[in-house]
């Protein structure tokens, strides 16, 4: 009998293939009219990046050859899309697309490969690559909802009755949101009071605070370059200071091995990654493109950071439901099985008794 996980993997790959082939109609239109018209190249460039990282993750993690093969096919399909876009796009869009390909599909991919290949080993490498892959994929599919939600909120909550924009109302919502953000950042204080009191990090992990420091750093940069982002920048600037205190306390009180591990995380995520993001967006992008790409990165990081517990919760929740269903079915049918066995035994005994009775009558 085929392994159920293999069958589910095949079904998942078929669904992924349909997603990769979905833009065929768009590119048939582009080739037919010999123009990209109003279409954007970023979705195909980012999907090419996601597929490329997926190949690397599938090759790195044992037993993930199905993931590697479907992402290999996906990367090939997306490469065809990007090449067609470069052929038929106007010169300005072509140059923009070439920059995106160089930054995301060459520079970023090479950085991920070199950093994880030469500074990490075993489960750490698999975990970090998987984290990056999940972040890119979630941001890629969730980014349209960010725009939809933003426009919906702006239209519903920051406009007056006659439809004009209410700047005071918008500012009040920003302040309320920032108060909530500060409350979230301050929530681990009790944990660190315990660490200082016991002079030990015990079983606590540093990774959540390192990631939170990365998130606040990038959001602070986003608030600086985005017009009207002053409140966002100041709140995340405060978040940087608070998270930096957390990480410093962790390094002071952690065991030597955990301290070294935390230092590696800091070097990669809080030094190398922000430096790469700032240099790329500052010197290769301008205007709305810079703001959109940086917002895309920040939104993806935040979604992964707050959504990552679902990776554990969802599979275990499904396992709980299936296990419960199995127990209910067992409780429903175990008595009927016992009754069936008893009836079979009685039938065998009746047949045996009837057979003896016939023999004795013949005598």
Image (cartoon, rainbow, N blue to C red):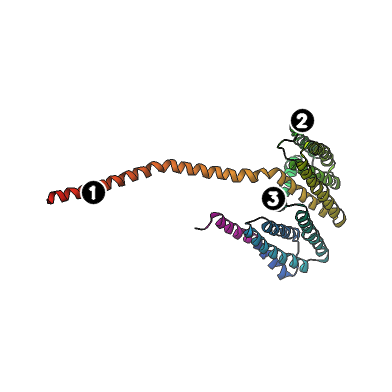
- Camera-side mark, 2 or 3: 3
Using residue 119 as the reference point, say whether residue 318 is left or right of it.
left
- Mark 3 lies on a secondary structure that is helix
Whether residue 361 is visible: yes
Q: Is residue 73 above or below residue 203?
A: below
Highlighted range, magenta: 1-19
Q: Earlier in the sequence, mark 2 or mark 1?
A: 2
- Mark 1 lies on a secondary structure that is helix
Judging by the rendered image, the residue that carries numbered circle 1 is 352
Judging by the rendered image, the residue that carries numbered circle 3 is 123
- Mark 2 lies on a secondary structure that is helix
Name the spot of residue 125 as percent of width and height, x first.
Answer: 72, 52
* Magenta highlight: main SS: helix
Q: Estimate how packed mark 2 is, as few (under 14), some (14 to 19) or many (20 or more) residues with alpha carbons within 10 Å.
A: few
- Residue 156 falls in image quadrant: top right
In the picture, the disc for residue 69 is none
Name the spot of residue 343 as percent of width and height, x first.
Answer: 30, 45
Count of numbered circles on the image = 3
Judging by the rendered image, the residue that carries numbered circle 2 is 193
| Disc 2 and disc 3 in contact, CB within 8 angstroms | no
């Amino acid at each position: 009998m085929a392994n159920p996980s293999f069958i589910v993997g095949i079904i998942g790959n078929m669904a992924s293939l349909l997603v990769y082939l979905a833009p065929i109609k768009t590119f048939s239109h582009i080739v037919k009219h010999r123009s990209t018209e109003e279409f954007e190249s970023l979705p195909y460039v980012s999907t090419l990046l996601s597929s490329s990282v997926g190949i690397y993750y599938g090759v790195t993690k044992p037993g993930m050859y199905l993931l590697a093969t479907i992402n290999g096919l996906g990367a090939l399909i997306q490469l065809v899309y990007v090449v067609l876009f470069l052929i038929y796009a106007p010169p300005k869009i072509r140059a923009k697309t070439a920059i995106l390909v160089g930054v995301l599909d060459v520079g970023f991919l090479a950085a991920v490969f070199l950093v994880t290949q030469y500074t990490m080993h075993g489960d750490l490498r698999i975990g970090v690559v998987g984290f990056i892959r999940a972040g890119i994929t979630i941001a890629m599919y969730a980014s349209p909802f960010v725009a939809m939600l933003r426009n919906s909120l702006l239209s519903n909550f920051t406009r007056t009755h006659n439809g004009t924009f209410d700047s005071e109302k918008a500012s009040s919502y920003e302040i309320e949101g920032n108060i909530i953000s500060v409350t979230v950042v301050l929530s681990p204080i009790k944990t660190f009071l315990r660490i200082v009191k016991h002079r030990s990090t015990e079983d606590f992990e540093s990774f959540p605070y390192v990631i939170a420091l990365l998130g606040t750093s990038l959001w602070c940069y986003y608030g600086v370059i985005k017009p009207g982002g002053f409140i966002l920048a100041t709140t995340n600037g405060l978040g940087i200071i608070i998270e930096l205190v957390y990480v410093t306390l962790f390094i002071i009180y952690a065991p030597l091995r955990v301290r070294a591990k935390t230092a590696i995380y800091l070097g990669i995520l809080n030094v190398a990654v922000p430096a790469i993001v700032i240099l790329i967006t500052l010197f290769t992008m301008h205007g709305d493109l810079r703001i959109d790409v940086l917002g895309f990165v920040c939104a993806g990081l935040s979604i992964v950071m707050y959504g990552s517990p679902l990776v554990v919760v969802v599979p275990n929740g499904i396992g709980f439901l299936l296990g419960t269903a199995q127990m209910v079915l067992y409780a429903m049918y175990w008595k009927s099985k016992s009754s069936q066995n008893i009836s079979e035994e009685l039938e065998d005994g009746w047949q045996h008794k009837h057979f003896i009775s016939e023999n004795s009558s013949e005598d």
